[in-house]
Amino acid sequence: MRAAPYAVNRRALLQGAGGALLFGASVVRAAEPDLAGLSDMTGDVRPITLAERQMRLARAQALMRAQGIGAVLIEPGASMAYFTGVRWNRSERLTAVMMPVDGDPLIVTPFFEEPSVRQTLAVPADVRVWQEDESPVALIAAFLKARNLTRLPIGIEETARFFASDGLARALPAARLVSANPVVRGCRMVKTASEIALLQKASDITIAAYRWTWPRVEAGMTPADIGGLMTAATRKLGGDPQFALVLIGEAAAYPHGSKAPQKVADGQVVLMDCGCAVEGYQSDISRTFVHGAASAGQRLVWDQVARGQQIAFAAARPGAAAGSVDDAVRRQYEAWGYGPGYKLPGTSHRTGHGIGLDGHEPVNLVHGEATRLGAGMCFSNEPGIYLPGKFGVRLEDCFHMTDAGPKWFSVPPVSLDAPLG
C-alpha cells in the first residue's frame, strides 16, 4: 500500500455537496483550495539570450562551410525557435527561415503575419513579406541568387514539408537540395549549460506535480481525472503542460494506451507519462504504481524495469554508440525471458530518445544507432516492460551526458512502494 505523504482528506477533496464523488473537470475544481499550496517554481529561470542565439547561428554557419552547404531552409517548429526565437505554427501559408552560410538569416512570411512573427523574433534578420497572390518561394530564390548561393547545395531541414522543398526545387532547377541534418542536428543535439538548466527546471516541475498528484489518486478515477489534476498542478508550478498520459490496468500493457474504459481499482497498475515545457524545453517522466496492494508479479516486473534503467544509465558512457545502450538493456531482458528483441512480452520500443525543444528529437537509444554519445547530449531512459492482456510498467527519467558520464535530470525511484522516492 502506498503511503500518503500529504496531510489531506482525499475523499473530502473529491466529495461534492450532495455526497457524490466528483470526477473530470470537477476533480480539478475541487482541488483548487489544495492547489493554493503550490507556488511558481520559475522565478529563477533565465531565458536564452541574444548572445547564445548568435553563437548558434555562428555554429550552424561553421558547419555549413564544413559541409559545403550554401544555405538551410527551415519551417516553423523547434528548429526555427532554436535559431531565431520565432514561435510559429505551420499552415498552408509558408513562413520559413533561410539561413545563409554568411550573414543574417532571411525570414519570409505573409504580409499580414509580419507583426506577429516579429513578436518572438530574437535575432537580427532580413524579414520579407509576400502577398496572397505572390510566391514566398520566389522571395527565397531571389535572396539566394543575390547572395550567389545557388551554386552551392541547399540544405533542407528534415521536418520541412514537401511543398516547401518542391517549390524551391522548381524555382531553382539547377540547385542541388541536400539534407540539413549535419547542420541542424550538429547544433541542436549538443545542449549548452543554459539549455540544460531549462531542461532541469522542467523536470523539477514535473516531479513536484507528481508529488502533489500521486496521493490524490482515488479508486473510481479515470485517466482524464488523474491527468486533469497533474495538468493543474503543473500549470500552478509554472510549467507549460505538454501531455499527461494515464494508463490504468491492462491499458498499461500498451505503451501509448487504449481507448477501452478505464477506472482505478484496488490492485491495478496506474502508469503515468507526463511532461511540461519551460521556455520551450521539455521534460518527459513516467511513473508506475499500484493502487492498493501490489501482486508479486507486479512487483517483479517493476523491479526489473528499475534494474533496466540502471543498466541503460551505466551503458551510456562518453564515446559509446547510442545503440549500445539499448543493446545492454535488451540482453538482460532476454536473459529474464522477454523478447527476443522488440517482441512481446518485453520492451517493444527503444530504450530512449533525444529530448530538448522537442519532446522527441534525434538521436535515439535504439539498436543500430551508431552516433557516439558526448557531453551535452540529452536522452530519456525508459526501458518499460509490457505484458499484453495483463499490465505494463514504465519508469522514465531523462539524463544528460557530461565528460564524466551521464547525469540524471530526475532521479529514478527505487521501490514500487515509494514511486516518487
Image (spheres, rainbow, N blue to C red):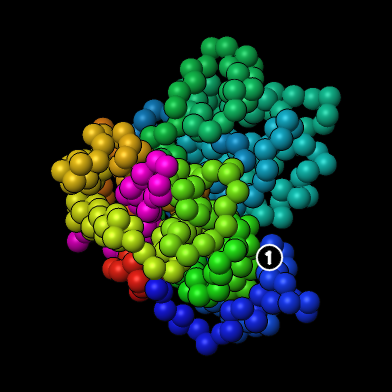
Which residue is located at x 36 percent, y 73 percent?
418
**What range of the chain is rendered magenta?**
382-408
Residue furthest out toward the top: 173
Find residue 38 and report its horizontal and vertical position in percent. 59, 80
Q: Is residue 320 visible?
A: no
Which residue is more in the foreground, 373 or 46? 373
Figure quadrant of residue 109:
top right
Local packing at callout 1 (Cα closer than 10 Å; few below 14, some 14-19, many 20+) is: many
Residue 112 in the figure: left or right of residue 198 = right
How many numbered circles are shown?
1
Give above or below for 345 relative to 146.
below
Which residue is located at x 40 percent, y 47 percent?
390
Of helix, strand and loop, which one carries label 1?
Answer: loop
Which amino acid type is shown beneath numbered disc 1?
Phe
Which residue is more in the foreground, 86 or 154? 86
Q: Is residue 60 magenta?
A: no
Residue furthest out toward the left: 335
**Residue highlighted by disc 1:** 23
Which residue is located at x 71 percent, y 35 percent?
91
Q: Quadrant of the C terminus?
A: bottom left
Find residue 302 and report its horizontal and vertical position in percent. 31, 58
